[in-house]
């Protein structure tokens, strides 16, 4: 009967009203009491079965609080893990950035060194070619001077030869004239 009184209190079952309804439909008082008692027992048994299958509000609230606590802990762990991962990524990114800057500086140094070497080689080659060109110009000038000297010497030799030929020719002509005059004088005498 303790279950019956607990059910009536928790379910707010009005057993008196239920008995009166049974009496109205034609049951005797004893039958109405028995029927009400049986119904109350059925409700009590169903309540026990239901309470075994379902949790109470307090247990549900406790489970919800426990799950919220676990979720908060999990969120904290995830946030901490994300922070650690982010810090690790930041360190890796910074290390890679420093490495990249170092490689850039090394490449720039090598390119500058190579450019300077190429400029030096080009300047040396340019100077060598300038020297060779100047040597060729000097040789050309020497050859021109030599050719001018030889041409002038040839002109002078030709002029001298021409003068000598003229002198010999004049001397020959004078000698022949003298011989002809001498022969003409001899013949006239």
Image (tube, grey):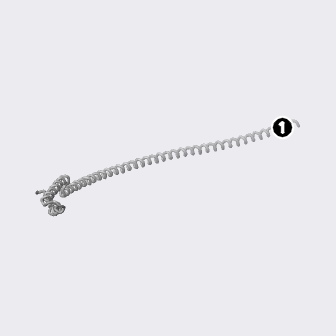
Residue position for label 1:
180
User: Quick check: 69 left or right of 147?
Assistant: left
User: Quick check: 130 left or right of 92?
Assistant: right
Where does the C terminus fall, quadrant-wise? top right
Q: Is residue 13 visible?
A: no
Q: Position of residue 99 (x, y in %)?
A: 34, 49
Q: Quadrant of residue 37?
A: bottom left
Residues 48 and 150: in front is 48
Where does the N terminus fall, quadrant-wise? bottom left
Q: Position of residue 60 (x, y in %)?
A: 20, 56
Q: Which residue is pictured at 64% across the width and 42% down the height?
A: 150
Residue that lies at the very extreme toward the right in this rendered image: 188
Residues 158 and 138: in front is 138
User: Quick check: 172 left or right of 101?
Assistant: right
Residues 62 and 89: in front is 62
Instruction: Judge the density around disc 1: few (<14), some (14-19), many (≥20) Cα neighbours within 10 Å.
Output: few
Instruction: Say what secondary structure mark 1 lies in.
Output: helix
């Amino acid at each position: 009967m303790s279950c019956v009184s607990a059910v009536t209190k928790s379910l707010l079952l009005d057993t008196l009203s239920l008995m009166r309804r049974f009496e109205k439909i034609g049951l005797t008082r004893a039958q109405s009491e028995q029927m009400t008692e049986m119904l109350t027992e059925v409700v009590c048994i169903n309540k026990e079965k239901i309470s075994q299958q379902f949790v109470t509000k307090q247990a549900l609230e406790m489970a919800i609080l426990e799950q919220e606590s676990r979720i908060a802990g999990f969120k904290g762990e995830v946030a901490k893990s994300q922070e650690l991962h982010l810090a690790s990524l930041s360190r890796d990114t910074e290390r890679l950035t420093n490495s990249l800057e170092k490689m850039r500086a090394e490449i720039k140094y090598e390119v500058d060194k190579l450019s300077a070497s190429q400029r030096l080689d080009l300047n040396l080659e340019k100077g060598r070619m300038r020297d060779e060109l100047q040597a060729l110009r000097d040789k050309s000038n020497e050859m021109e001077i030599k050719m001018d000297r030889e041409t002038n010497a040839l002109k002078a030799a030709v002029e001298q030869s021409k003068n000598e030929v003229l002198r010999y020719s004049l001397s020959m002509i004078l000698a022949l004239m003298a011989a002809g005059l001498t022969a003409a004088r001899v013949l006239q005498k």
